[in-house]
Image: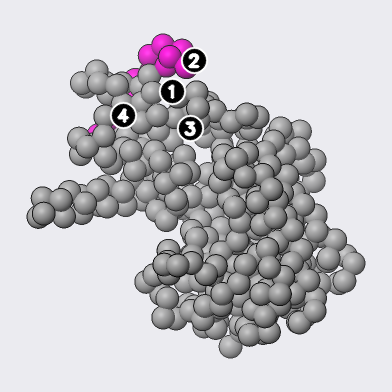
């Protein structure tokens, strides 16, 4: 039985990865930050199967202790301040967690168990102002946010430890991946939650920023499988994980509303643009300038050819299925809220 240590285990990716590894009979350890109220987040349903360790990415001693306790054969670093918008409000904290924190966990591995295999969660946000389309492992980086910059440090320090200390350390450059477990601060979940509430008549409209931003969206469940595959290879390397399809925020909105029987028609231009329900002429989408980024990332499109060939990885959940799953999940949540409210 292998031991795996997951940082960020209560998040979207951490929870799917924990389920995946438990199915493969791993002994799973998960790092949690100590809080006044214990919150198991997305692993509430499997918390009794996980060995939790209190530690923090900014506290190197606690990470060394976590490695001693877990004796991990595989370490998956998914912990991050992962919301791009927040990185402008908390740039130093983002740098500490997403950048220096990677060095802290790598040092813990180097000191305690240098033969452990390490996965670093890199991101397509490192490409930022893209230098070529589509993006591959060889595309130059140009991050456009404190989040992207911090993640780029984490990416390069992982490569440096691999080359300097001969650690088995690799990075997955994952493009946008969503799921029913995505936090509501992220645009995809914000959309599907709002669609469910608008459909049930408890929200008037949805407010968004740049409707024409293009992203390469996949499902988290597919992407955590790629993480595991990277650590099963003979040689550590870095891989782009993506769908090789790009969609605008507008397309995501249209598909989400369509799934609940609402056809959106667009009127006016720029910040005055609105989306209306074709059958009722009611405004269901508005543009709010406060949701625009200070430095926009206009298009992300990844080419996963290397992962397809060397890892044998293919995505199984389509864009349409991703949107359907997220909308259905939020419709179910809202319906339960309404029932509870009616009972009271």
Residues at badges 3 and 1 in contact (C-beta under 8 Å)? no
Above-or-below relation of 245 to 100: above
Looking at the image, which residue sits at the far left?
343
State the CA–CA distance, disc 3 to disc 4.
16 Å
Q: Is residue 239 visible?
A: no
Numbered mark located on residue 249 in the image: 3
Task: Tell me if 306 is positioned left or right of 315 in this view.
Answer: right
The percent coordinates of residue 221 (x first, y second) are 49, 60
Q: Which residue is mark 2?
A: 270
Which segment is the magenta one? Answer: 260-273
Is residue 33 located in the magenta-colored stretch of the structure? no
Dot 2 or dot 4: first in sequence order is 4
Dot 4 or dot 1: first in sequence order is 4
Q: Is residue 86 visible?
A: yes
Residues at badges 1 and 2 in contact (C-beta under 8 Å)? yes
Q: Residue at 31% across / 29% down in the picture?
A: 205
């Amino acid at each position: 039985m292998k031991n795996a240590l997951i940082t960020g285990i209560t998040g979207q990716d951490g929870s799917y990865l924990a389920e995946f590894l438990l199915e493969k009979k791993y002994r799973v350890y998960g790092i949690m930050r100590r809080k006044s109220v214990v919150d198991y987040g997305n692993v509430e349903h499997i918390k009794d199967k996980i060995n939790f360790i209190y530690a923090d990415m900014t506290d190197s001693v606690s990470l060394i202790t976590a490695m001693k306790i877990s004796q991990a054969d595989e370490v998956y670093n998914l912990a991050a301040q992962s919301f791009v918008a927040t990185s402008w409000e908390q740039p130093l904290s983002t740098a500490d967690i997403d950048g220096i924190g990677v060095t802290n966990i790598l040092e813990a591995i180097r000191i305690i168990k240098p033969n452990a295999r390490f996965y670093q969660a890199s991101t397509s946000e490192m490409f930022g102002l893209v230098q070529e389309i589509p993006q591959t492992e060889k595309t130059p980086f140009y991050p456009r946010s404190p989040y992207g910059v911090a993640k780029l440090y984490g990416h390069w320090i992982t490569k440096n430890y691999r080359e300097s200390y001969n650690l088995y350390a690799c990075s997955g450059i994952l493009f946008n991946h969503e799921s029913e477990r995505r936090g509501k601060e992220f645009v995809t979940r914000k959309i599907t939650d709002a669609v469910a509430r608008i459909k049930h008549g408890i929200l008037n409209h949805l407010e968004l920023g740049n409707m024409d931003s293009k992203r390469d969206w996949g499902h988290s469940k597919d992407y955590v499988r790629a993480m595991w595959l990277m650590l099963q290879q003979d040689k550590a390397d870095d891989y782009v994980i993506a769908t090789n399809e790009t969609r605008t925020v507008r397309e995501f909105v249209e598909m989400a509303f369509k799934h609940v029987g609402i056809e959106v028609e667009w009127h006016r231009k720029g910040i005055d643009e609105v989306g209306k329900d074709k059958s009722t002429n009611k405004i269901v989408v508005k543009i709010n300038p406060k949701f625009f980024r200070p430095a926009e990332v206009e298009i992300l499109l990844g080419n996963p050819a290397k992962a397809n060939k060397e890892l044998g990885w293919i995505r199984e959940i389509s864009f349409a299925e991703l949107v359907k799953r997220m909308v259905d999940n939020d419709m179910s949540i809202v319906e339960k809220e309404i029932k509870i409210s009616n009972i009271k």
